[in-house]
């Protein structure tokens, strides 16, 4: 099981320094693709460090030539790692037929606070046909939005068919059979007219260069009267996640949500209407 929370409080105490972060990132890059336990151990050590590190430490890491040389690899590994973690969690929920299994997920608490933050930010727009692109096998965000907006139609779009299969089963176990799940690659879809709000996942475009292409695609094909939202790395999250480059939105009216409860990522809301 990958997602157990540490039993010993001492495991939550991690020294924070640029060299320590760089060493962990280097170790992550050296892990084998099938060594999920090894990656879990490294990220379980790295994540609390990033969560508590000072701005000076993070800026030093990001500016390091050592990190710049491996940044895309770290981001790609993180995206694959999170997908595999979600697959294991979805499998556990399905096998045990128990939604409470999700409470043991290591990131469970901050997912909830981040989702509450986003839900409140989007509430004034009163959108009722919401699409989540890159929802994965454990569609936490779509299920949360559906629970918090009972009158809304919420749809997941996921490119991997096995993830769609797991997500359907998970949604049923969570008592949300009305959650719609579409097996399609959002980066290849050109008609989003059925939706009045499109939310693009954090690792849709797993590295920064791909993220720029993703932003251009959705700005081009999502109708102007629909709300368009991008999750983007913020602060220390830039070490492990891709970011939307502000230059790609320079001529587009948008708001970057400030003060996210979990400082690794935030949401950018594009409202061209």
Image (cartoon, rainbow, N blue to C red):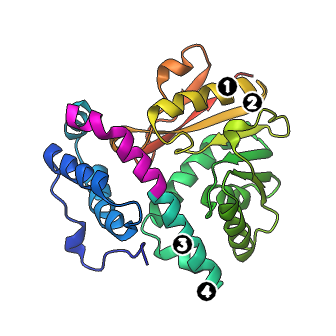
134 above or below 211?
A: below
Q: Which residue is mark 3?
A: 89
Mark found first going from the N terminus, 1 or 3 = 3
**Residue at the spot of label 1:** 219
CA–CA distance in space, label 2 to label 4:
39 Å
Q: Quadrant of the C terminus?
A: top right
Q: Which range of residues does the magenta coloring cover?
A: 65-80
The crowd level at tag 2 (other Cα within 10 Å; few <14, some 14-19, many 20+) is many
Q: Which residue is mark 2?
A: 222
* Mark 1 and mark 3 residues within 8 Å of each other at the beta carbon: no
In front: 79, or 123?
79
Residue 237 in sight in this render:
no
- Whole-percent x and y of residue 203? 52, 45
Q: Earlier in the sequence, mark 4 or mark 3?
A: 3
The residue at 59%/72% (across/down) is 90
Image-quadrant location for residue 141 = bottom right
């Amino acid at each position: 099981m990958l997602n157990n929370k540490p039993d010993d409080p001492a495991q939550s105490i991690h020294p924070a320094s640029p060299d320590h972060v760089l060493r962990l990132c280097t170790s992550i890059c050296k892990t084998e693709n099938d060594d999920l336990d090894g990656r879990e151990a490294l990220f379980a050590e790295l994540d609390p460090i990033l969560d508590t590190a000072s701005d000076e430490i993070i800026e030093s890491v990001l500016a390091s030539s050592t990190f710049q040389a491996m940044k895309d690899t770290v981001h790609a590994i993180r995206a694959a790692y999170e997908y595999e973690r979600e697959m294991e969690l979805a499998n556990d929920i399905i096998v045990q037929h128990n939604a409470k299994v999700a409470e043991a997920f290591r990131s469970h608490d901050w997912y909830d606070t981040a989702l509450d933050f986003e839900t409140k930010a989007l509430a004034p727009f009163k959108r009722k046909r919401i699409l989540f692109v890159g929802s994965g096998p454990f569609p936490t965000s779509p299920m949360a939005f559906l629970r918090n907006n009972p009158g809304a139609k919420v749809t997941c779009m996921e490119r991997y068919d096995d993830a769609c299969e797991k997500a359907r089963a998970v949604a049923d176990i969570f008592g949300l059979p009305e959650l719609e799940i579409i097996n399609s690659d959002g980066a290849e879809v050109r008609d989003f007219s059925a939706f009045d709000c499109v939310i693009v996942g954090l690792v849709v475009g797993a590295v920064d260069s791909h993220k720029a292409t993703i932003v251009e695609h959705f700005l081009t094909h999502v109708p102007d009267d629909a709300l368009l939202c991008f999750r983007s790395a913020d602060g220390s999250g830039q070490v492990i996640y891709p970011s939307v480059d502000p230059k790609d939105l320079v001529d587009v009216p948008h708001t970057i949500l400030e003060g996210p409860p979990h400082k690794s990522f935030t949401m950018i809301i594009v409202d061209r209407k």
